[in-house]
Image (cartoon, rainbow, N blue to C red):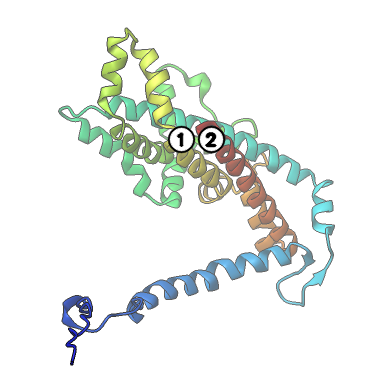
Amino acid sequence: MAVLTAPERTSPAPPSPRGGRARGPRRTPPMVLAFLLVPLLAEAVWVFWPALQGFYLAFTSWDGVSAPRFVGLGNFREMLHDEVFRTAAVDTVLWLVLFGGLSAVLGLAAALLLQQERRGVGFYRAALFLPVVFSLVATALVWQAIYQPDGVLNQLLQSFGLGSLRHAWLADQDTALYAVIVPALWRQVGYVMVLYLAGLKGIDPALYEAAKVDGAGRRQRFRYVTLPQLRSVNAVVLSVIIIDSLRSFDVVWSLTRGGPYHSSELLSTYMYSTAFQSLRLGYGSALAVVIFVLAFGVIASYLVRAFREAD
């Protein structure tokens, strides 16, 4: 007797997407790779490779013509006995404190005053930001005319009956550094203001409303609401200020060239004069390494502390 058995049913294979074959991992289009690799290659050739060469030259004695001669830590030992280097280091720290501190404080104050949308506020924002678009050399030339013995500043002092305060601002060792800080600060405040304005726009207004309900005054709202919410912006501002402070060169060189008698000498101007005027490129590279270590150390220590506080 024959027994009929039903054929086994097989589940149909799931349809492939879009009716085609199942695809493997998608490949990155060559055009996308080109847009990524070409900038990286340019950055490696024009930035990273010269930076590595600079680190190597810091351990050599080189005049830019003959072959570099390896001297080990000789350039760094020379700095310990270099009076001009000590003067430039002290002036750089003073520049960092005054230029950096004042630009942060004034930029935050301007942002707090101009954060509210009201009539005419756009004009004041543009006026404060306008110096940022000027080149530092052009800014220095304008302020050089202002600081001349018969310039605008001395004329204003004379017109207000303060003729006794007339001064050769850029030619006096006691005032040259501070006179140079003013145009650099004039240009930096607008940039810092824009950074803080962006941070203030990101603060939730509900936090201020809750603080008002709790009876917090204006100072308390600034201390316990605004400042904590600006922590990430402060990290960016600090990094920008430190980098700009340590690489400040154009305005100082255009106004005083580090003088008179190195009274306004910064590490950046001393590095330039040593490397390209005295043709001691090895010692100049060592100065560049010191500038890099200072910038990296200050920024890294602040970021580590900020991350610990955030955790």
Q: Find residue 2 and name its label.
A: none
In the image, 263 versus 295, the foreground residue is 295
Residue at 32% x, 35% y is: 197
Q: Are marks 2 and 1 in contact (CB under 8 Å)?
A: yes
In the rendered view, would you say 16 is above or below 109? below
Residue 164: x percent and y percent? Answer: 52, 19
Q: Find residue 234 and name its label.
A: 1
Residues at marks 2 and 1, CA–CA distance in whole angstroms: 10 Å
Residue farthest front in this picture: 1
- Element marked by disc 1: helix
In the rendered view, would you say 1 is above or below 65? below
Which amino acid does the dot numbered 1 rest on?
Asn
Which amino acid does the dot numbered 2 rest on?
Ala
Figure quadrant of residue 178: top right
Reading the image, the residue beneath label 2 is 306
* Residue 154 seen in the figure: no
Residue 20: x percent and y percent? Answer: 20, 83
Label 2 neighbour load within 10 Å: few <14, some 14-19, many 20+: some
75 horizontally vs 188: left or right: right
Residue farthest top in this picture: 215
- Element marked by disc 2: helix
